[in-house]
Image: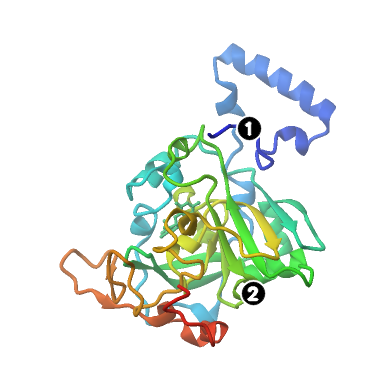
Amino acid sequence: MHVHRRHEWELPESAVTPESVYQTRAAGRRRFLAALGIGVAAALRPARTLAATVGFPSSPNPDYDGRGLEKTPWELVTSYNNFYEFGTDKRDPKRYANRGWQTEPWTVEIAGLVRNPGRIDVGELVRRMGGIEQRVYRHRCVEAWSMVVPWDGFALKRLIEFADPTEEARFVRFVSFFDPDAAPGQRRAILEWPYVEGLRLDEATNELAFIATGIYGKPIPNQNGAPLRLVVPWKYGFKGIKSIVRIEFTREQPATSWNRMAPHEYGFLANVNPQVDHPRWSQATERIIGAGLFAERRPTLMFNGYARQVAHLYEGIDLRRHY
Ligand code: MTE
């Protein structure tokens, strides 16, 4: 059963303004708006300016400038999406994630086995990370389609250094938002909500692991996981959890949404691997989104083309068994 409660990340204005000031202001504003016939919810909605734009313009990272890769057009990256909180059709997220769902202000909680736990506003977090950079990455879904996306954001490693995990921490668990009033998919048991994902700590501190706050140099649209989402380009897209509200450091491997739903189809590691087929389809090739219906499929690359950066993480592990 899903019970809706007020969540930590729905920071009321009272959290950032002294209580007395807030009370008088809010009451005055409600009277004023009532006189105008404007709904309180609509009028209190903050302008999309603060956290979402922090850090822009981002600086291109020359190691990931996308040379040799053909970028998928913005229009496709932002209209062909998986975000089951807003429906299971690829067009649903664009449509339903932009009907009043608020991604600002947004607070992220850092918790678990860390020396620096707490809750932090996304804009402030980006400032603490020292700004943002742009990296062009391949993006490969377990459904065997692929894109190339210029993400803006910061290395997850920086956030981990900021959180300062204790020696006991071995995994990082990420939790997405839960708000069935705003997210129609969460009113149905498509998955167990909220969406959860996880990485081993050594994967999370790999140079490739990235937190995206933008795409194509602009704040990340709601349908792509505003205001911040994980990007781990050597893994299948479902590991790239969107709209994160909590980052927790644990000793034990955390349960993850798709693995819990169908353990023999979706592993915890979920590394892109042309040699390990999904039980219901081949992973040997992929369909390039935007290339056209009759375009040839492309061979899938081991670790999605990032073996140089990540292969060492899996030495001694049988990736056919542990997928
Ligand atoms: N995160 C949440 N919270 N909910 C989701 O349904 N879908 C995942 C991942 N992150 C998903 C999610 C899947 S299956 C993929 S392929 C990618 O997001 C898609 O990201 P994109 O829409 O930006 O291409």
Q: Position of residue 306 (x, y in %)?
A: 46, 81
Q: Is residue 315 left or right of residue 320?
A: right
Q: Position of residue 308 (x, y in %)?
A: 50, 87
The tag earlier along the polypeptide, 1 or 2, is 1
Q: Position of residue 132 (x, y in %)?
A: 61, 66
The answer to whether residue 153 shows anywhere in this view is no
The answer to whether residue 114 shows anywhere in this view is yes
Residue at 37%, 65% (x, y): give it.
Answer: 142
Image quadrant where residue 237 sits: bottom left
Q: Which mark is residue 36?
A: none
Residue on which disc 1 sits: 5
Q: Are the two marked residues, 1 and 2, in contact with CB atoms closer than 8 angstroms?
A: no
Q: As displayed, is residue 78 above or below residue 132? A: above
Determine the secondary structure under disc 2. Answer: loop
Judge by depth and name the residue closer to the eye, 155 or 190: 190
**Residue with the most extreme left position:** 294
Amino acid type, label 1:
Arg
Query: How packed is label 2: few (under 14 Cα within 10 Å), some, or many (20 or more)?
Result: some
Q: Is residue 24 left or right of residue 104?
A: right
Residue on which disc 2 sits: 205
Amino acid type, label 2:
Thr
